[in-house]
Image: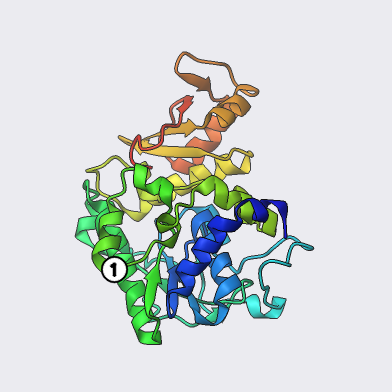
């Protein structure tokens, strides 16, 4: 047993016992750290009684889209988690590659999806959802997250009922109890279980075990949905989301990790963690409020955003726009 696993042995056992108390469970699987950790533990203790359900949505960040694909583990680290043969890892339903209709902005319905094996050895279903088709979400009011979470988990519950799974679980953890999370209200109303929260798991602990088990996702930055980059009360559309995605993808390509491209009043503002601001300072000058972005980076962002870009990157504050 790995030393990290030994350190969390009692807490891991409590989570495993919680999961074993479910007759069967469908897990909302985004591809982020929390849902990957939950899926990995499910694969250890109840592999024949679990279904992963992924929602393909224009709100998902590119890193989570990529990691919601069949999961790989580092060679030599397969001892703790069952891994499906490579040939079983192909999806029959695109995950993160769905294209919205250019005229309506709607995503095509994939009915209840088609199960495929993942490298957890667990079946995976992907369903496309169109949050922008719901006025309460599109209008981007204070309860947008509530309406969006409710829409998504109503679909997951539909899949679970269709396939006979007794419970539905999400990846909320103990850290989420301390944050502004309107979506947690929807989770509670729908009767969705949050075993990581119930057992007191926090993201740094999950990262440690995922790293010990060989999952590349252990170091995936936390990434709230792209809708959080748009000020509350400003209507959402695909163009705005595409602008944010293009800018953040470029910033990630520079090796930056925790960055946000806020689209405020038609102008992009870059926010970055302390570590990423330090990295940027090697290319640009320190400014009163942050780090001056090099002209080349501003030009690249402007080309991708097709709108003005503030020339100074500022410190990222979690919850500044609830993202």
Question: Where is the N terminus found, in terms of image quarters?
Answer: bottom right
Q: Is residue 211 left or right of residue 203?
A: right
Residue 119 rendering spot, x and y as whole percentages: 64, 72
Which quadrant would residue 309 be assigned to in this image? top left
Say few, some or many: other residues with alpha carbon within 10 Å of mark 1 (under 14 / 14 to 19 / 20 or more): few
Which quadrant would residue 82 be assigned to in this image? bottom right
Residue 183, above or below 38: above
Q: Nearer the viewer, residue 204 or 7?
A: 7
Q: Residue at x 55, y 53 (%)?
A: 63
Q: Is residue 91 left or right of residue 314?
A: right
Q: Is residue 305 left or right of residue 140?
A: right
Residue 108, above or below 1: below
In this view, the residue farthest toward the right is 76
Question: Where is the C terminus found, in terms of image quarters?
Answer: top left
In this view, the residue farthest toward the top is 288
Q: Which residue is mark 1?
A: 191
Residue 173 rendering spot, x and y as whole percentages: 43, 53
Residue 137 rendering spot, x and y as whole percentages: 25, 56
Residue 132 visible in the current orientation: no
Q: Residue at x 55, y 37 (%)?
A: 300
Dot 1 falls on a residue whose secondary structure is: loop
Q: Is residue 70 left or right of residue 259?
A: right
In this view, the residue farthest toward the front is 10
Q: Residue at x 69, y 80 (%)?
A: 87
Q: Residue at x 54, y 70 (%)?
A: 42
Residue 160 visible in the current orientation: yes
The scheme the figure's colours follow is rainbow
Residue 267 rendering spot, x and y as whole percentages: 37, 34
Which quadrant would residue 44 be assigned to in this image? bottom right
Q: Nearer the viewer, residue 90 or 28?
A: 28
């Amino acid at each position: 047993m790995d030393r990290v696993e030994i350190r969390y042995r009692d807490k891991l056992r409590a989570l495993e016992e919680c999961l074993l108390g479910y007759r069967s469970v469908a897990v909302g699987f985004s591809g982020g750290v929390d849902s990957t950790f939950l899926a990995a533990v499910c694969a250890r203790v109840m592999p024949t009684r679990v279904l992963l359900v992924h929602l393909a949505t224009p709100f998902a960040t590119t890193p989570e889209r990529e990691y919601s694909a069949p999961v790989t583990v580092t060679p030599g680290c397969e001892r703790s988690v069952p891994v499906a043969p490579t040939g079983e890892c192909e999806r029959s339903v695109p995950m993160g590659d769905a294209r919205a209709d250019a005229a309506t902005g709607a995503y095509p319905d994939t009915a209840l999806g088609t199960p495929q094996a993942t490298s957890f050895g667990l079946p995976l279903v992907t369903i496309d959802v169109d949050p922008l088709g719901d006025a309460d979400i599109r209008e981007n009011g204070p309860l947008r997250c509530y309406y969006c979470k409710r829409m998504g988990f109503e679909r997951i519950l539909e899949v679970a009922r269709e396939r006979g799974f007794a419970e539905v679980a999400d990846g909320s953890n103990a850290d989420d109890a301390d944050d502004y999370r309107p979506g947690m209200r929807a989770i509670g109303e729908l009767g969705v279980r949050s075993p990581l929260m119930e057992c007191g798991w926090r993201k740094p602990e999950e990262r440690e075990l995922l790293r010990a088990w060989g999952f590349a996702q252990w170091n995936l930055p936390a990434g709230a949905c792209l809708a959080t980059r748009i000020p509350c009360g400003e209507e959402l559309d695909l163009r705005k989301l595409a602008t944010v995605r293009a800018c953040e993808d470029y910033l990630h390509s520079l090796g930056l990790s925790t960055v946000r491209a806020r689209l405020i009043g038609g102008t992009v503002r870059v926010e970055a963690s302390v570590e990423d601001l330090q990295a940027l300072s090697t290319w640009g000058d320190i400014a009163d409020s942050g780090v001056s972005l090099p002209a080349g980076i501003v030009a690249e962002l402007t080309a991708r955003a097709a709108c003005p870009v503030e020339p100074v990157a500022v410190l990222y504050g979690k919850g500044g726009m609830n993202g």
